[in-house]
Amino acid sequence: MNSSLGHILLIANPAAQSGAGAAAADKAAANLRAALGEDAVTVVRTAGPRHACAIAEGARGAQTVVALGGDGLIHEVVNGLMTRPAGDRPQLGVIPVGSGNDYARTLGVPAKVDRACGLLLSASPQPADIGCVNGSFFAETLSFGLDAAIALDTMERRKRTGRHGAALYMASGFDQLFHHLDQREYRLQLDDGPVMEGKSITFAVQMGPYYGGGFRICPDARLDDGLLDVCISHPPITPAGAAAIFLMAKGGNHTRLGRMELHQAPKVHVEFDEMPTAQVDGERIEARTFDVEVLPAALRVLR
Ligand SMILES: Nc1ncnc2c1ncn2[C@@H]1O[C@H](COP(=O)(O)OP(=O)(O)OP(=O)(O)O)[C@@H](O)[C@H]1O
């Protein structure tokens, strides 16, 4: 049993995974209370966008904040926790109830509520780096161009159809590949190094390896190495070539291809010729210039 959990604040998104979050929250609370005692867990259900951020920011008296929901919910909880002074920042646990669950995948937290609770009860807090882009925080992924367009289109399709999973991502992927294979000119600077210019089709800046529901776009990314991992694909790429890259990225094997460029750095500055489609932890972000840095060991995360 994990004695370092202290009082748990469970922040649950009842709307996650097309409404599955509501029952998952009841199950998780019952599970954790059965192990730790009735008073050990406070449950707060989010009422809408940005509520989780406010709850995490204002949480007092909890040693552990558990985010129950998808990557969007975790993103909000991380942003709330990061507004707290480092010495007064609860540790983070996650119970993945989303469609992508990429952060949980990186942490090794299973997607079943019972098993995720079991892991929390035996886990120990490990330092985890947090990314910061243009002043807001992210846990796992930031990307520009085709990959972001696919991630965002997948989310919109899910809201329309109620479906989820990798098949939906694939369907969206093929649609975007054939209709939106846009190139973006960029200027990139890693730390204080020279400015590199190029054209990209996909451009990811990662904390952990995954985006899009299990695509290992940056296979070497680690949450505790103090580095951002960058993966850029360059034109010309045909729709079939781009599809092959995505299929290979499922296993992290795309990095062998010549048109992929990989970097690691604690600080990345990138500006595009036009505002690219961009996502951060699966949510839309709008800008043309992105200042990204890593905040080493900014959170303690249960894993
Ligand atoms: N009560 C609510 N009703 C509707 N939306 C909510 C509610 N609470 C939070 N949200 C919003 O739902 C969005 C998506 O939630 P979440 O990430 O938990 O699930 P998901 O979309 O199913 O999973 P994923 O992010 O993995 O695709 C978040 O951006 C959050 O702001």
Image: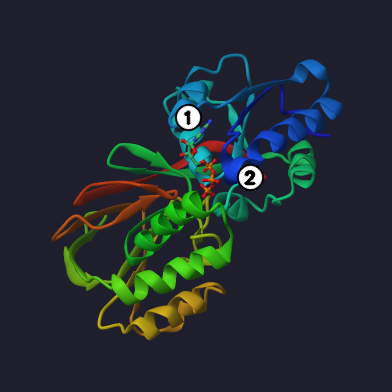
x and y, in percent, of residue 97 in the image: 63, 45
Based on the displayed image, in which of its 4 quarters is residue 117 positioned?
top right
Mark 2 or 1, closer to the camera: 1
x and y, in percent, of residue 116 in the image: 73, 44
User: Is 282 on the left-hand or right-hand side of 44?
Assistant: left
Q: Is residue 78 above or below residue 226?
A: above
Q: Is residue 248 above or below residue 92?
A: below
Based on the displayed image, in which of its 4 quarters is residue 174 positioned?
bottom left
Answer whether residue 94 is visible to the viewer in this image.
Answer: no
Report which residue position mark 1 lands on: 48
User: Is 244 on the left-hand or right-hand side of 166?
Assistant: left
The residue depicted at 75 percent of the width and 34 percent of the height is 28
x and y, in percent, of residue 153 in the image: 40, 58
The residue depicted at 73 percent of the width and 28 percent of the height is 4
The residue depicted at 58 percent of the width and 45 percent of the height is 18
| Residue type marked 1 | Gly
* Helix, strand or loop for disc 2: loop
Ligand 1 has an atom within 8 Å of the beta carbon of the residue at disc 2: yes
Q: Residue furthest front?
A: 161
Packing grade of label 2 (10 A; few <14, some 14-19, many >=20) is many
Ligand 1 has an atom within 8 Å of the beta carbon of the residue at disc 1: yes
Q: Which of disc 1 and disc 2 is earlier in sequence?
A: 1
| Residue type marked 2 | Val
Residue 97's tag is 2
Do residues under tags 2 and 1 come within 8 Å of each other at their CB atoms?
no
Answer whether residue 218 is visible to the viewer in this image.
Answer: yes
Quadrant in which the N terminus is drawn: top right
